[in-house]
Every structure is written in structure tokens, then in C-alpha cells.
Image (spheres, rainbow, N blue to C red):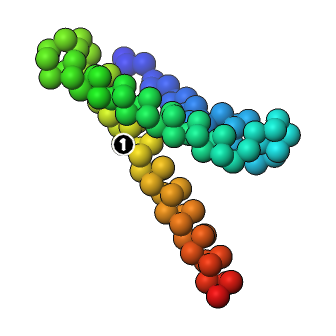
Amino acid sequence: MTAPISAIGGVAPVIAPAAASPTTSASNGTNFADQLSSGLNALQSTQTKSDNLAVQAATGNLQDVQDYTIASSEASLAMQLTTAVRNKALDAFNEIMRMQA
């Protein structure tokens, strides 16, 4: 007889709840520029990690190929998110400029 299949556990959030809260930035004194800068630094480190693992995979020095696959997916998603935020910011800027004209 086979054992029953257990339920799949919940997925951990990508962003910590404290970082996602809009009131957190106002209460701890960080401003938009600091958060934007730290986000771009995180994107850069994710891209660098993916690039390093790609080189290791190409040279045959990478033990687990799934490490590269995961890092590449993370880098791709981070870039898509950054691009979407940039596009929304440009749309908002253009809308403000139209309202002033």
C-alpha cells in the first residue's frame, strides 16, 4: 500500500513584508533614491552571479547545473521587474508633464 501524498507547503515571499510596507520607508528615514539605488545594486549582483555561473557552466567547473538555471531565472525576473518599474515611472512623468501643458 502506498503512503498518501502530503500537502505542499506555502511559498516564502520574495520581498520581506517590512520592505514591502509603504510606511516603513517613511518611518526609518530611507528615501526613494536610496531604495532605488539598493534595488539597482541588487540587480547588478544578481546579474554578476548569473554571469559567473554561466562561465563556470561553459568551462565545465560547475557541479550543479540547476544553480545556474536558478540564478539565470532570478536575473531575468529581476531585469523584467526593473524594466516594468522604469516604464511605470516614465509613464507617470509623462502624465505629469501633460497635466502641466
Residue 41 position within the rendered picture, expressed as x and y whole percent measured from the top left: 51, 34
Question: In this rendering, does residue 72 appear at all?
Answer: yes
Residue 83 position within the rendered picture, expressed as x and y whole percent measured from the top left: 45, 54
> Which residue appears at 65% of the width and 76% of the height?
96
> Which residue appears at 51% of the width and 33% of the height?
42
Of 64 and 84, the residue lying toward us: 84
Question: In this rendering, does residue 21 appear at all?
Answer: no
The answer to which quarter of the image holds residue 44 is top left
Q: Residue furthest front?
A: 101
Residue 72 position within the rendered picture, expressed as x and y whole percent measured from the top left: 32, 34
Q: Residue furthest left?
A: 59
Quick check: 22 above or below 73?
below
Quick check: 93 above or below 75?
below
Quick check: 99 above or below 74?
below
Residue 77 position within the rendered picture, expressed as x and y whole percent measured from the top left: 41, 44
Q: How many marks?
A: 1
Q: Residue furthest right?
A: 27
Quick check: 100 above or below 71?
below
Q: Which residue is mark 1?
A: 76
The answer to which quarter of the image holds residue 50 is top left
Decide if residue 84 is on the left or right side of residue 10: left
> Which residue appears at 60% of the width and 70% of the height?
93
Which quadrant: the C terminus?
A: bottom right
Which element carries disc 1, helix, strand or loop?
Answer: helix
Q: Amino acid at mark 1?
A: Ser
Q: Residues within 10 Å of mark 1 (few under 14, many from 20)?
A: some
Which quadrant: the N terminus?
A: top left
> Which residue appears at 37% of the width and 19% of the height?
2
